[in-house]
Amino acid sequence: MDLPEACWELICKLIEKDDYRFLESVSLVSTSFLSITNRVRSTFTITDRTVPLLHRHLRRFRNLKRVSFHHFTKNPVSTLLQVSRSGLDLESLDVWGMPYFPDSEKSGMKMMSNLKEFNVGAIKELREIDLVSIGLCFPSLEKLHIGYIDFLPGPVLDSAIISLSQNLPGLLKIDVTGNTLMTDKSLISLSRNCVLLREVILRDCDLISSDGIEFLLRNSKKLESLAVSGIGWPPKESFSTDAFVYARCLSELDLSGSSISVEFLRSIADAKLPLKKLLLSYCEGIDFDGLLYLVSKYQTLVELSLKGSSFLTDEMVTKLVVFLRCLTSVNLSWCSKLTGVTFFNIVETCVSIKRVKMRVTSFGVEETSKEVDINIKSGLKSLYISGHQSLGDECIEKISRHCPFLETLDFGGCNAITRDGMLQVLRNCGNLTSLNIEECIDIKCIGVVDFELPKLETLRTCGNWINEQEPYTIRKMCGGLLTLDLRGSFNVRSRGVKEIVRRCTRLRAIFLDKCEADDEVFTWLVCEIPSLKKIVGPSGFSPSLELKNLALRHGCVIY
């Protein structure tokens, strides 16, 4: 059916929004589709292997808005200069993890004056002069990430943040996680100079005190989201009882890893904030009465995390969920006293729930005789319940009957689940797109099946049940796979790999760590599965230069 080009462009934009990599196959249909996909592409990732042809990519995709560097080890200055001179009207630049900050003059970054978002997190040598240059080069910047979550940083001092804030009056979001030499002076400067500030993330900033946070809450009238960890621990003082009263727009609050007194919890409750998201993971000092009082005041919460709250029991959660009927996401992982009773209470009471995380609890040790009304189907989309030794077939089958619309399911490490339980899940949950059954050692085999999983895109297996007969079964069930993770599948050999993926014409990534695969299978994969972009070989596998070049010519990388 012929459609106007404008309609095809809208369709391609929807595809690009989901995953721009899907546009590759569309672009091969015709020259008209090639032109359309070139126009709608808005995101581009620069790696070492894209550098030689970068100038062609930049000429081809003229409407790019977001450019990021990934595992980049080459000279960033010359590469950034190419991007700067391309004439692209970029809105977002991500140089996360580079060994040093590129010189703003030599890299031509001043030419990207319309940049709205900049990520320089985890740069190991970020100097004060670099932060000053960011403020001068990008006056329109709205989002800035200078946090160091995974790497030891070079110190970011107050003077740099003060200079930065003076040059970025339109800043909306800043992440300074892990900058241990920052003090309250930085927060005060940000609050005074960046009057539009809506989101502040300052986890693991050891010298930030409650006084600095209170100043931010009182003076940043538009603040909507605050994430801070470690409050309440010495030498930090306690908050005043009206600390949150002035934060009239605060809808997201993350206090994970803090020591929270009952009085502090009640002061948040009494502040009457427009809270929608509350994260209290691994917090000390919380008691049930204070928590119950808090949720009773915020019955419109849509996201809640109480991860690591070891005091919680099924009876307590039953009382809490009465006030949490609007929840769409909850994290109760590592709450050791909670069982499946809590899970079923949540999915029955919280009618809007879409995501539940209950990893490493006591799920499965409860009495299974308690029935739930399976005629009332839950709209739950994502469930993460890995790490339960007692969760067996009866319980997982009950979950699949009550939650037939699941799209993501992770029950890795649930050793009591067998083939029968897994097959019931697969039959009942036909919408699954991601499944993790890693280390489910009681799943010995799949056997013959009479159904398919056409929507399944990601499969992570435990490996030990993939014998010589199983590859055909997997191939039959999972023809639409994009990612196949066979790590730990000791008995999977080259022949088995071929059988599994022969029908997976959309496969983009395969992980073969600890599989018995030889060099020949990698050549076969590259040549027979044109969609494949990433292959991770077994431990100790070192692909030859010839094999690497063959893969690259087919648009694939072998690790």
Image (cartoon, rainbow, N blue to C red):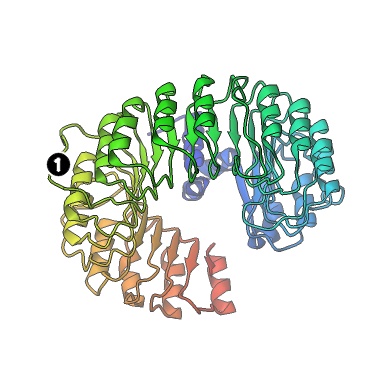
Q: Residue at x 36, y 54 (%)?
A: 360
| Vertical order, 379 against 490 (above or below) | above
The relative height of residue 554 versus residue 176 in the rendered view (above or below) is below
Residue 498 placement, left or right of 81: left
Given the image, on which type of amino acid does mark 1 rest?
Lys
Q: Is residue 140 something one can see in this rendering?
A: no
Camera-nearest residue between 50 and 165:
165
- Residue 319 lies, with reference to residue 486, above or below; the image says above
- Residue found 44% across the figure and 33% down from its top: 303
The answer, for residue 369, to whether it is visible in the render is yes
Q: Which corner quadrant of the image does residue 221 belong to? A: top right
The quadrant in which the N terminus is found is top left
Q: Position of residue 47 (x, y in %)?
A: 64, 58
* Viewer-nearest residue: 448 or 330: 330
Q: Which residue is mark 1?
A: 370
Count residues near mark 1 (Cα–Cα under 10 Å), then give few for <14, some for 14-19, many for 20+: few
Q: Residue placed at 22% from the left, 71% from the top?
A: 469
